[in-house]
Image (spheres, helix red, strand yellow):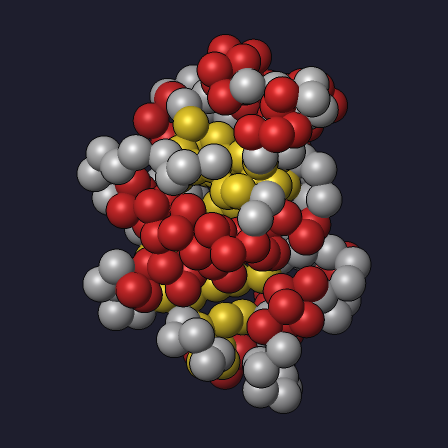
């Protein structure tokens, strides 16, 4: 199973949820999970992990042929493997990422690709290689409009695409700062996969529910 995560708002959301989902999949019985960081700019994933070992090779070294994929794989303390973001951002392409994860697919139960922020072309091309494309956004007018735009560029099959709302709170909805969940689904025309609360202490449960829902199980949204 290969899953791509594209944040239409900021790179921090994709990095944070990629790590949370990878950890939750390990806890849901996936023995081998790989996170491939294809973000551009500051390496947010490695910064968030903080405990990542010193990296000798990264995704760029794999894409350029300087090393084999297994040489760029590192185990983090949360129990999953990671290929760090390329130091040379110019070599990051969806075609390279797609070929890499296809090559590694048979070695892992799940592979998560953290895509460049708001790169619709990248997400569209990579959708040919993945089993599920997740669109990540805040539930405000701008974010949902961007999510709808990206959704229109992805395959028509709604089963292969899902919406993840992050930093969500019912209080913000009451203040008209965020849209309600039904409005988000209707406007984005995308099935809802997960709502990640603004409250940090509740996020891990949301990631666990997402991991279970990816397997086809029906679990309710956590209390917001």
Q: Position of residue 87 (x, y in %)?
A: 74, 70
Answer with the quarter of the image where residue 129 lies: top left
Quadrant of residue 103 in the image?
bottom left
Vertical placement of 61 versus 139: above or below?
below
- Give whichever of 113, 91 is nearer the camera: 113
| Whether residue 18 is visible | no
In the displayed structure, would residue 128 be above or below residue 69? above
Position of 116 compared to 222: left or right? right
Q: Going 59% across and 72% down the picture, which residue do you hit?
A: 49
Residue 173 screen position, x and y as percent: 62, 23
Residue 11, can we see it? yes
* Foreground pick, 208 / 122: 208
Q: Is residue 32 left or right of residue 44?
A: left
Q: Residue at x 47, y 15 (%)?
A: 182
Residue at x 29%, y 40% (from the top left corner) = 213
Image position, residue 201 (x, y; %):
50, 56
Number of numbered discs: 0
Q: Residue at x 56, y 54 (%)?
A: 200
In front of the other: 11 or 3? 11
Q: x, y percentage for residue 165?
A: 54, 34
Q: Is residue 80 left or right of residue 1?
A: right
The answer to which of 74 and 171 lies nearer the viewer is 171
Check the image and report above or below for 68 versus 113.
below
Q: Is residue 26 left or right of residue 147?
A: left
């Amino acid at each position: 199973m290969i899953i791509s995560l594209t944040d239409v708002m900021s790179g921090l959301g994709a990095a944070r949820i990629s790590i949370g989902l990878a950890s939750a999949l390990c806890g849901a019985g996936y023995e081998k999970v790989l996170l491939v960081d294809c973000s551009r700019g500051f390496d947010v994933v490695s910064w968030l992990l903080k405990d990542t070992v010193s990296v000798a090779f990264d995704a760029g070294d794999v894409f350029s042929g300087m090393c084999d994929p297994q040489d760029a794989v590192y185990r983090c303390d949360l129990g999953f493997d990671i290929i760090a973001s390329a130091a040379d951002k110019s070599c990051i392409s969806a075609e390279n990422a797609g070929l890499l994860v296809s090559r590694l697919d048979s070695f892992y139960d799940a592979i998560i690709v953290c895509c460049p922020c708001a790169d619709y072309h990248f997400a569209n091309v990579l959708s040919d290689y993945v089993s599920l494309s997740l669109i990540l956004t805040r539930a405000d007018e701008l974010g949902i409009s961007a999510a709808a735009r990206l959704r229109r560029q992805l395959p028509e099959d709604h089963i292969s695409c899902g919406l993840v709302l992050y930093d969500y709170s019912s209080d913000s909805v009451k203040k008209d700062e965020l849209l309600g969940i039904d409005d988000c689904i209707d406007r984005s025309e995308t099935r809802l996969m997960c709502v990640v609360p603004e409250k940090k202490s509740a996020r891990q449960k949301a990631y666990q529910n997402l991991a279970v829902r990816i397997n086809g199980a029906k679990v309710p949204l956590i209390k917001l």
